[in-house]
Image (tube, rainbow, N blue to C red):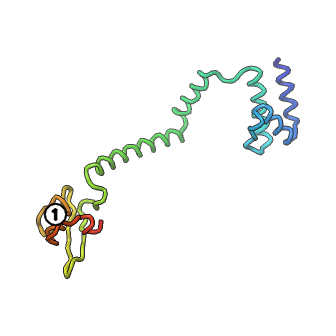
Amino acid sequence: MKETVLTQIAQVEKMSMKELKIKYMELYGTDALPVQNNKSYLFRRVAYMIQEQAFGGLSETAKTRIDELINEQDPLNAIRQKQAKIAANIAKSAEAVTSSRDLRLPLPGTVITKHYKDGIIHVKVLDKGFDYNGKAYKSLSRIACEITGDHVNGFTFFKL
């Protein structure tokens, strides 16, 4: 059987590009068109499949071990894993920050400016609440209500 496989591989090595593509599609299925248009690549793929059909492919244990080694030893994979961990930590941090505050609001320390009637209104965003004219407020709506005298949505009033 070994001689038959070697003979087949020797024949494949002498094939033209067109014959190699036909052999490739015979071995991998008629729907499987070769991705590469490289003779040495096609030769290796066809030779491998001939050997795999004759002697069998990799065992599931070997495939599993290869995947484990790739995850452990591949430097690019290690970089990707580190980047994924960093991204996850950033997402957790962002979630912790944003979960306690409304995303429509600017960051604490920002001063919201509003032109109203003949004056300018300045409201400073705090960690929890707002500062307007030296007084702390829990919501923009309370500030808008104090300014206008009517119940007004704070986000709408300050155009946030």
Quarter placement of the N terminus:
top right
Residue occupying the far left of the picture: 135
Residue 124 percent coordinates (x, y)? 20, 65
**Label 1 CA crowd tier, 10 Å (few <14, some 14–19, many 20+):** some
Residue 82 percent coordinates (x, y)? 45, 41
Q: Is residue 51 left or right of residue 85?
A: right
Asked if residue 143 is positioned above or below residue 57 in the image, the reply reads: below
Residue 156 percent coordinates (x, y)? 27, 66
Nearer-the-camera pick, 1 or 155: 155
Nearer-the-camera pick, 100 or 41: 100
Write down the residue under mark 1: 142
Asked if residue 134 is positioned above or below residue 83 in the image, the reply reads: below
Which image quarter: residue 121? bottom left
Which image quarter: residue 144? bottom left
Quarter placement of the C terminus:
bottom left
Q: Is residue 117 left or right of residue 29?
A: left
Residue 87 percent coordinates (x, y)? 41, 46
- Residue for point 64% across, 21% down: 59
- Element type at mark 1: helix
Which image quarter: residue 158? bottom left
Asked if residue 43 is positioned above or below residue 124 in the image, the reply reads: above
Residue occupying the far top of the picture: 1
Q: Amino acid at mark 1?
A: Arg
Q: Is residue 139 left or right of residue 6?
A: left
- Residue for point 18% across, 62% down: 130
Nearer-the-camera pick, 159 or 68: 159
